[in-house]
Amino acid sequence: MQRASLVRFWARKTRSERGGRAAARSSHATAVAFGREGLCDALRHQLGIAPRCGVILLHCVGVAEISEALGSPGRALLLSGIGLTLRKAVGESDLVVGFGDGQFGILMPGTSDVSAMAEFAMRLVEVTSQPRNIFDREIVIHAVAGVAQADYDDVDAGIDHAALACREARRFGLGQVAIYTAQLALEAGQRLQMTSGVGLAAARQELRVVYQTINDLITGEVVGEEALVRWHHGELGLVAPKDFIPIAEESRAILSIGRWVLEQACDRMVTLVNESENPPKMHVNVSARQLEDLSFPATVRSILAQRELDAGMLTLELTESVIIDDTDRTKEALDALKAIGVRLAIDDFGVGYSSLSYLSRLPFDAVKIDRAFIAGLGTDSADGEVIRMIAGVASRMRVDVVAEGIETEEQRNEVVRLGCVLGQGFLFGVPGPMGGNAGESVELAR
């Protein structure tokens, strides 16, 4: 869906309800009524006039931070200005109703086309996101919006549906608008189950670690293994990492899960060291939450020491999103890990906000080229040039390059031609309990 800066939704009670009780609930700064009750009353009134009514719920982001910076007077001025903007954009101030702190409901009587409502919500987002001058400071508020239809027989459901869509929009970032659907409600219920269970997944023995090999592209030799966590939920079945890892990040359950995965991977390293004179190195993914944890370097050192493992055998992989800010705190965290002796790698390199300058500013030993570039080989010449450029710069800086997602011999031959020496992917075997295992299902592998 189209992106734009986000808006907060203001709601006003209808003219017929602006009596003493409505006035008592009004904010002197914004001149709009607040509360779910006010929104329900306004929605019932509109549904009594028209057979259908759309509900848009907007949530403004960052009001608490603005209150800290400008104080209550600045916050009141800001919200008052947004309220005026919304009432002007809607054209009928009766249809703008305050819904809690920083949330606003917009009613659209007679409207059943949710796509049209979504387009209108996006326009509201755009006009509200314009910079505002508060106490000689330029302030920009961002918001998200959810859209739903309301029925007279169940007004509360209409508001709940819009609120659920609003939360869904927030999951995808600032400036997003989401439309309520039955599928969205089903997915929200599943996320609730995941949120409730992810913190106990390890204790319930629902987690497992599978390993995917990293291979020398010329000889085929296994030079490394990447530890990948999988969750088999008691009711939901196999949950994809892309679905539960963000939830674990938000709840901070990723700290305990990350430690458990690291311990399992290091136990695997002990087995590899005992089995081979030249064991493959172990790669373990690290989340932003883990990197922010001041005790994380000490945790890594302790886990390695307990197993008498050489720190140089362990590579910690971080995605670009973890290091995108390139702050002093990030540099300190990476330096602390390097001081232990572990290796560091940038995972999924090339997507988002890639910059080869990371390789010179931050202490990385390896870069893993995102699988999207490998998948595009043969169809998009630009992908090949990107791979060649990354491989060339990394080689000059003595940084290893791993091409991810290699599935065919043609792809292997091409990335070798472009300068890559290492790679991983289904060509060498899908992730399994003890390295590449063709018996594992592709669903589990991904």
Image (cartoon, helix red, strand yellow):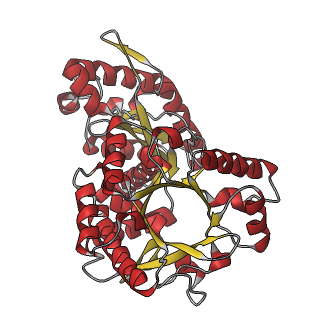
Q: Residue furthest bottom?
A: 439
- For residue 236, say whether it is visible: no
- Which quarter of the figure is the C terminus placed in? bottom right
Q: Is residue 284 shown above or below 57?
A: below
Q: Which residue does the image show at 51% across and 83% down from the upper left?
A: 432
Tell whether 397 sits left or right of 282: right
437 and 20: which is toward the camera: 437
Q: What residue do we see at 24% from left, 26% from top?
A: 67
On the image, the x and y values in percent for residue 265 come to 38, 75
Is residue 389 visible in this depiction of the protein? yes
Q: Position of residue 42 (x, y in %)?
A: 35, 40
Give the residue drawn at x 55%, y 72%.
Answer: 223
Q: Position of residue 173 (x, y in %)?
A: 46, 44
Residue shown at the point (32%, 62%) measured from the top left? 254
Outermost residue toward the top in this view: 136
Q: Is residue 143 above or below residue 53?
A: above
